[in-house]
Image (cartoon, helix red, strand yellow):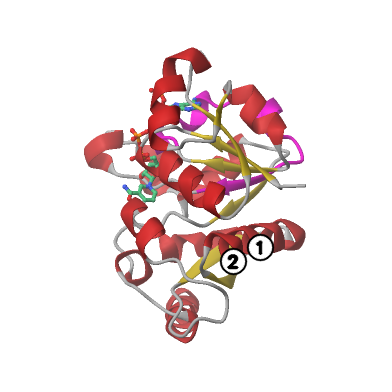
Amino acid sequence: MSPTLGILGAGRVGTAIARQALRAGYDVAIAASGDPAAIELIVEVMAPGARAVTAAEAARASDLVVLAVPLNRYATLDPGMFTGRVVVDAMNYWAETDGHVPALEAARSSSEMVAGHLAGARVVKTLNHIGYHDLEMDHAPAGAPARRALAVAGDDDAARARAMELIDRLGFDAVDAGPLAAGAALEPGTEIFTGWFDRPGLEEQLELARAATVR
Ligand SMILES: NC(=O)c1ccc[n+]([C@@H]2O[C@H](COP(=O)([O-])OP(=O)(O)OC[C@H]3O[C@@H](n4cnc5c(N)ncnc54)[C@H](OP(=O)(O)O)[C@@H]3O)[C@@H](O)[C@H]2O)c1
């Protein structure tokens, strides 16, 4: 049976992840903020084969749910929908589009803010540091030479492992970045956010980021 992936957000990133997940053999349930009828056509065109559902249905569809909504919307998500779920936070804070959110600017990492709101969810940060175009350009089968790598940060070991399995299925080497706080090294403005790395390169960048935080 195909594994199912729930995706909240049917914009550029959500539909790109949906297409890549469909290629990887996932059954995909995708939602925007409102009535699924409003995104049926978008989904049919942008991610044919995915199911347009409500946000609650997308969260219920799988124990693995990707958040691809504008970060300034995180507080509108109902935490109850995500209890026990592995929630992949693919979001970034962009003041240009999100507006200035002082709490996010002051936070150690945006994913920890998201996790604080979604108490009961097992939040993992990944998929935020690859452009949505690149997700469909740079994927390669496991074992391919110079396969692009993506980092996975999260406090729950099993949740991190689930997200790493997703990354591998989507066509990327998954590198364990450690705790959710390490997600700060994947945020906009960092080397990892702006760069292209294979596994050794990404491991080196994560090590440099770790060293910089303990200095
Ligand atoms: N640009 C990139 O290459 C890239 C790469 C990685 C990550 N990101 C990050 O990914 C996130 C999404 O970016 P995007 O460019 O895909 O945004 P987008 O094109 O504006 O799409 C946002 C989607 O989120 C939905 N949404 C908003 N609130 C929601 C809610 N409460 N529940 C469910 N769906 C909701 C919107 O639906 P409605 O129309 O119903 O509001 C819309 O479908 C951002 O945080 C961005 O920084 C971007």
Q: Are marks 2 and 1 in contact (CB under 8 Å)?
A: yes
Residue 62 lies, with reference to residue 75, above or below; the image says: below
Residue 129 lies, with reference to residue 25, above or below; the image says: below
Task: Indicate which quadrant contains ligand 1.
Answer: top left
Q: Secondary structure at mark 2?
A: helix
Does the segment drawn in magenta span residue 74?
yes
Q: Which mark is residue 62?
A: none
Residue found at the very far left of the displayed protein: 96
Residue 78: tell me if it is visible. no
Quickly name the residue at label 1.
165
Residue 198: tell me if it is visible. yes
Query: Residue at (63%, 64%) from the top-left corner?
Result: 164
C-alpha distance separating marks 2 and 1: 5 Å
Quickly name the residue at label 2.
168
Expressed as whole percent of the image width and height from the top left, the position of residue 24 reads: 57, 55
Residue 84 occupies quadrant: top right
Of 4 and 210, the residue lying toward us: 4
- Label 2 within 8 A of ligand 1 by Cβ: no
Does the segment drawn in magenta span residue 81?
yes
Residue 192 lies, with reference to residue 45, above or below; the image says: below
